[in-house]
């Protein structure tokens, strides 16, 4: 489908099992598709309900962090034979007193705005997350201190995923802090249009100068849309982005791969239309 739609390659996401990587890459290369980007954490197979991969930046569990580092190393081993040069890195999720499902429920009913029933819950989540920032940064540094040298030895670039809300790490501010601290290593960011759109919907959009810095530090550019606070829709199938009031759009550096992302049920026609849509606005 990717080849028929006119793409130059594929990116392997975190839902792909490790056993599927080799045949998927071989099939892609056979039809002329490169594989420049892969997730830095892949499961053995389909994860059952309630199961997840270990987090590199787990705040409390050192065993989990070590398991995540081992999982990252196995992804490096998988990537090397197929010439994958960039691994995306999800550092982790956080447990807050305010549950994300409750906030999503309140958001769907427009109850997180001021004076609404969910406003206090939302304010508590944002406040707790900000208070945890020093611990989050320390956990992220622990992870990067261990995976950056491994990536460097294999000449692989790391693309850090930026949080999509209070329950993820690192936040946009924290991501820029890490980018500065590890500027001598092969570390960049993922610029995710839908995540920026989602943060704006929640009132957490980074200021313009920070947005520009995040885009400038991106080594992967993910093109997708949000619907409310749900992300991962093909470009053109989500909500229109908020107006930028004359502010310049973030600029993509030359050579940064653009990954068009959608949902598993996306049709071939929708995928082709999304590729054309992105190609028309991305030089």
Image (tube, rainbow, N blue to C red):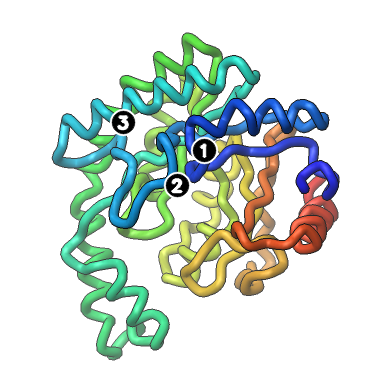
Q: Residue at x 35, y 51 (%)?
A: 48
Pointer 1 and pointer 2: residues touching (CB < 8 Å)?
A: yes
Q: Percent x, y for residue 1?
A: 77, 48
Tell which circle, 1 or 2, labels the residue nearer the N-terminal end: 2
274 vs 32: above or below = below
Q: Which residue is mark 1?
A: 189
Q: Residues within 10 Å of mark 2 (few under 14, many from 20)?
A: many
Q: Residue at x 21, y 56 (%)?
A: 95
Q: How many marks?
A: 3
Badge nearest the viewer, 2 or 3 = 3
Tell which circle, 3 or 1, labels the residue nearer the N-terminal end: 3
Q: Which residue is mark 3?
A: 68
Tell me the quadrant of the picture where the C terminus can be found.
Answer: top right
Q: Which mark is residue 162?
A: 2
Element carrying mark 1: strand
Report, in whole angstroms, how far the alpha carbon at label 1 lies from the one at label 2.
7 Å
Q: Percent x, y for residue 230?
A: 49, 67
């Amino acid at each position: 489908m990717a080849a028929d739609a006119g793409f130059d390659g594929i990116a392997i996401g975190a839902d792909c099992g490790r056993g599927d990587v080799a045949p998927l890459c071989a099939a892609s290369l056979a039809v002329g598709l490169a594989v420049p980007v892969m997730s830095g954490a892949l499961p053995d197979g389909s994860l059952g309900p309630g199961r997840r991969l270990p987090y590199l930046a787990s705040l409390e569990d050192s065993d989990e962090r070590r398991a995540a580092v081992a999982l990252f190393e196995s992804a490096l081993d998988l990537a090397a034979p197929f010439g994958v040069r960039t691994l995306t890195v999800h550092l982790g999720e956080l447990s807050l007193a305010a549950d994300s499902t409750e906030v999503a429920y309140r958001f769907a009913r427009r109850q997180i705005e001021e004076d609404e029933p969910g406003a206090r819950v939302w304010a508590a989540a944002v406040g707790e997350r900000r208070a945890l920032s020093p611990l989050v940064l320390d956990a992220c540094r622990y992870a990067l201190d261990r995976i950056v040298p491994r990536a460097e030895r294999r000449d692989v670039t790391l693309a850090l995923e930026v949080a999509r809300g209070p329950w993820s790490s690192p936040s946009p501010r924290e991501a820029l802090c890490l980018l500065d601290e590890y500027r001598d290593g092969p570390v960049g960011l993922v610029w995710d249009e839908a995540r920026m759109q989602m943060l704006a919907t929640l009132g957490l959009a980074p200021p313009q100068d920070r947005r520009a810095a995040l885009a400038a530090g991106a080594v992967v550019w993910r093109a997708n849309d949000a619907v409310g606070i749900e992300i991962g829709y093909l470009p053109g199938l989500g909500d229109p982005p908020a107006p930028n009031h004359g502010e310049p759009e973030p600029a993509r550096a030359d050579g940064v791969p653009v990954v068009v992302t959608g949902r598993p049920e996306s049709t071939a026609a929708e995928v082709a239309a999304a590729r054309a849509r992105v190609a028309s606005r991305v030089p």
